[in-house]
Image (cartoon, grey):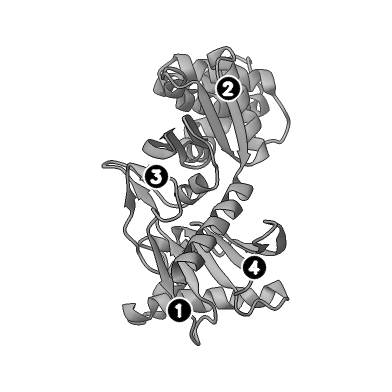
């Protein structure tokens, strides 16, 4: 058995494949692009082939990506998490349910043996659900976080807040923060009052955080418009004010809970925004830990690899 794995993070709009050294967790080679599950699903629909061929259509695409690594990956297992196990993925798998003990044997997995469509064994990871909420992808990241008695926040298009007690996920909620920001800043009346930029307008962002946490979001969001009309903010400043407004509103529920520890699992830019926002609206009350999402994913995939290879003996 190889001491390497192919770690695949397959989201709705993105695809990332990494060759990982299992012993060191070092990324040896990587391929990434915008061939997300939604794109491949549309390609599959365009073939108008029978549903029974769908799985192999996706597996053939994955096989084509191995060639881009430009390295021998024979006899290497592929572990896939994200939207590949959804209704638009390679095969829909049932969600695991709460409470979920954060060990590799508790996630819902399915193995696909190597054949002519894909010359590698594939381990597909399913998602997690409550009675009213779902996630696909973050459940795998949870496995790689190694934290306890904390609120884990996954900032993003659909932010997730997960309560962890006794190494067990006991509840979670989804906040459509990133999607609302995109809609409001590009397709609403407010689009004329904001201008996308990479500058750091920290004061505008903090003002937005405070207003978002303290006010009704349907009312406060109109202030983006009046900020420009009354020349309180430039369109560039308003872009960051709107970001702060939505993040502050998302986090308001977190700071009113009894939770004292918060763990952010994300990339660096979102980590800075969420750390600033949490400290502003809680007066630095929380102990905030930050985990890089890529590192958590790799760690989780290695755990799943060890669990599978051990159970297969």
> Which residue is denoted by mark 4 in the rendering?
4
Of mark 3 and mark 4, the one earlier in the sequence is: 4
Separation (CA) of disc 4 from disc 1: 17 Å
Q: Residue furthest top?
A: 283
* 165 versus 102 height, above or below: above
**Tag 4 secondary structure:** strand
Identify the mark nearer the N-term, 3 or 2. Answer: 3
Whether label 1 touches label 3, CB < 8 Å: no
Residue 273 image point, x, y percent = 62, 29
Q: CA distance from mark 4 to mark 2?
A: 36 Å
Q: Is residue 87 left or right of residue 305?
A: left
Decide if residue 227 is in sight here: no
Q: Is residue 144 visible?
A: yes
Q: Element at badge 3?
A: strand
What residue is shown at x 39% (from left), y 76% (from top)? 54
Residue 151: x and y, percent? 47, 30
- Residue 9 in picture, x, y percent from top left: 55, 58
User: Measured from the top left, where is residue 177 in percent x and y?
Assistant: 48, 35
- Closest to the observer: 280 or 227? 280
Nearer the observer: mark 1 or 3; the answer is 3
Circle 4 residues within 10 Å: few <14, some 14–19, many ≥20:
many
Q: Nearer the viewer, mark 4 or mark 2?
A: 4
The disc placed on residue 287 is 2
């Amino acid at each position: 058995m190889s001491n390497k794995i192919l770690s695949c993070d397959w989201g709705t709009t993105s695809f990332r494949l990494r060759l990982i050294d299992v012993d060191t967790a070092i990324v040896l080679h990587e391929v990434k692009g915008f061939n997300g599950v939604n794109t491949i699903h549309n390609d599959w629909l365009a073939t108008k082939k029978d549903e029974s061929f769908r799985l192999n259509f996706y597996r053939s695409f994955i096989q084509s990506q191995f060639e881009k690594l430009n390295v021998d990956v024979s006899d290497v297992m592929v572990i896939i998490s994200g939207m590949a196990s959804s209704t638009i993925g390679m095969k829909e798998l049932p969600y695991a349910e709460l409470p979920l003990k954060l060990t590799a044997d508790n996630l819902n997995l399915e193995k696909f043996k190597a054949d002519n469509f894909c010359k590698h064994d594939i381990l597909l990871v399913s998602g997690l659900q409550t009675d009213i909420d779902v996630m696909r992808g973050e459940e795998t990241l949870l496995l790689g976080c190694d934290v306890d008695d904390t609120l884990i926040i996954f900032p993003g298009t659909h932010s997730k807040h997960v309560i962890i007690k006794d190494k067990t996920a006991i509840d979670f909620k989804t906040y459509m923060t990133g999607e609302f920001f995109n809609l409001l800043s590009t397709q609403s009346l407010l689009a004329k009052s904001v201008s996308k930029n990479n500058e750091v307008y920290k004061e505008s962002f903090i003002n937005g955080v405070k207003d978002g946490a303290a006010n009704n979001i349907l009312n406060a969001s109109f202030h983006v418009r009046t900020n420009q009309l009354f020349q309180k903010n430039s369109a560039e400043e308003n872009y960051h004010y709107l970001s702060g407004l939505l993040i502050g509103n998302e986090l308001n529920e977190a700071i009113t809970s009894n939770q004292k520890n918060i763990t952010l699992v994300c990339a660096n830019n979102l980590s800075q925004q969420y750390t600033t926002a949490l400290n502003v609206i809680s007066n630095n009350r929380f102990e905030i830990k930050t985990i890089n999402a890529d590192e958590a994913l790799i760690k989780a995939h290695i755990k799943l690899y060890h669990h599978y290879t051990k159970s297969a003996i």
